[in-house]
Amino acid sequence: MLRTLSGPVLVAILALAGCRPGAAPRPRDAGRPRAVMGPVTPGPALPREPTIAVGAAAVGELTPQDVALPDGPVSDSYIVELTADQRVTIVARGGPSNSTPGALLDVSCEVLQGARVLTTDDDGASTPDGAHNCRILFQARAPGRYTVRVRTPGTRRELGPYNVQVYAGWLPTQT
């Protein structure tokens, strides 16, 4: 609770603090040389999401050190800059799973704007050989930064390498 003090209570508090009403403020180190702080050393940089350009690809790996999602799996995120009404196809393909020997990593993708998930896909680019890849056809409603998040589907925490590509336009099929 904040109260405004006045009168004798304020004078008593100021006196205890070494102040006199009406007197000019006096720094504690008046008359003494001032200590100069040394150079400030910046701390470690906060992790930033890498960018991926339209028409480019990135290679990544889901590891135990990646960002853990509330529902269990880990994820990697990439920033893509899009213009209003720009259409892209996002494809992520899993490599050899580090969690299930002999299998391919099952990946899913999400497109977010801020913390809001705009769209998601799990097996939109699966192949007959058992690859569980994802494919999203996305059209930006507004210009800006969108996040492409690569993860494993559901609550499973699977690990392994993957690649993600952002193609210009909508591709009718992509494996």
Image (cartoon, rainbow, N blue to C red):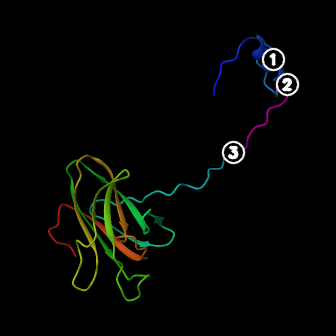
Q: Secondary structure at mark 1?
A: helix
Give percent across and percent down for residue 120.
28, 63
In the rendered view, tell whether residue 142 sits above or below residue 168. Answer: above
Q: Secondary structure at mark 3?
A: loop
Q: Nearer the viewer, residue 72 or 3?
A: 3
Q: Residue at x 41, y 84 (%)?
A: 100
The residues tagged by marks 2 and 3 sit, at their Cα atoms, a distance apart of 25 Å
Give the amino acid at mark 3.
Answer: Pro
Which tag, 2 or 3, sits closer to the chain's start?
A: 2
Q: Residues within 10 Å of mark 3 (few under 14, many from 20)?
A: few
Identify the residue position indicated by label 1 in the image.
12
The residues tagged by marks 1 and 3 sit, at their Cα atoms, a distance apart of 41 Å
Identify the residue position indicated by label 2 in the image.
31
User: Left or right of 113: which side holds 31?
Assistant: right
Q: Nearer the viewer, residue 165 or 108?
A: 108
Give the amino acid at mark 2.
Answer: Gly
The residues tagged by marks 1 and 2 sit, at their Cα atoms, a distance apart of 26 Å
Which tag, 1 or 2, sits closer to the chain's start?
A: 1
Magenta residues (range): 30-40
Q: Is residue 24 visible?
A: no
Give the mark toward the camera: 1 or 2: 1
Identify the residue position indicated by label 3 in the image.
39
How many numbered markers are drawn? 3
Residue furthest to the front: 1
